[in-house]
Image (cartoon, grey):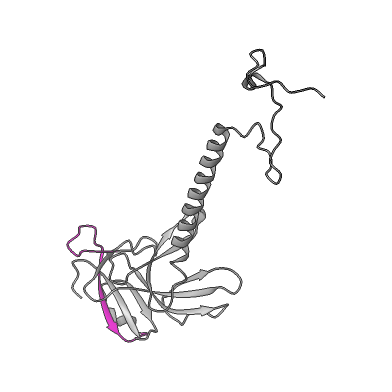
Amino acid sequence: MTTPPSDDNPFRTPDYATHHAPMPPVQGQPAIPHWFTVKVRITLAACVVLALALGSLAALGLNAVGSTGTPENGDCLYLTRESGDRTAYHRVGCGSDRATYKVENTYRSGIACASGDYVRFRTGSGAGRTLCLALNVQSGDCVRGIEDETTITKVSCTDPAAQDRVQVVSGFGDEDACGEHADKVLMYQGPPRRTVCLVKTGENI
């Protein structure tokens, strides 16, 4: 049996100069791949943060669209012409100048709106809903762009762009109620039953 060298042997190779084999990984802990460098870890962390940020934005956009929901009776909105000649609705407060239409009734499936000059707007497909839209105006309002439901706008009566002044008459079915100067006559079953007279600005009504 060989006696190990004593600590005071001047010719012994120092421990720090002895080559040691790499330590095996601790049992239960997976070895870290050689490619998993600090740079790689930073890049992966940045990608995770970016993905989370994009996910948050997507969720925010989805909530913004979903929060509008399908309009109910009494809600107000305005219409726009989208690509492909499709019409879209946008809900707004009924006191807003942009609130050109009010939902007077809603029906499911194929049930039609009551007789009158309602703008019929179909939402969804299959068993969707039909919105019956009446012009959201009162006597004394002025409007422009009445040729198209997506361009009609309420404006100040002093605005040079104002084309028609509104007069609302109680009752339904009597076109003569607006007189001979009416530029356009719209009738709604309501409630309330009413006739909306659009008269060129400057005309007496």
Query: Image height check: is 96 above or below 48?
Result: below
Q: Nearer the viewer, residue 32 or 69?
A: 32
Tell which of 11 and 127 is nearer to you.
11
For image coordinates 51% across by 79% down, the residue present is 107
Task: Tell me where residue 108 sits by quadrant.
Answer: bottom right
x and y percentages locating residue 53 in the rendered image: 48, 49
Taking the magenta stretch, the answer to whether it contains residue 167 is: yes
The quadrant holding residue 142 is bottom left
Is 175 placed above or below 200 here? below
Q: In the displayed structure, would residue 70 be above or below residue 155? A: below
182 sits to left or right of 2: left
The location of residue 66, given as percent across then percent down, is 47, 65
Q: Residue at x 52, y 74 (%)?
A: 129
Q: How many marks?
A: 0
Residue 135 shows in the view: yes
Residue 179 seen in this snapshot = no
Q: Looking at this view, is 180 or 22 the one in front?
A: 22
Rendering coords of residue 182 (x, y %): 28, 73
Question: Relative to the observer, which residue lies in front, 67 or 31?
Answer: 31
The N terminus appears in which quarter of the rendering?
Answer: top right
The reply, left or right, for residue 186 in relation to residue 127 is left
Instruction: Magenta stretch: give its range.
Output: 154-173
Q: Quadrant of the C terminus?
A: bottom left
Going by the picture, which residue comes out furthest to the right? 1
Check if residue 176 falls in the magenta segment. Answer: no
Q: Position of residue 145 (x, y in %)?
A: 32, 61
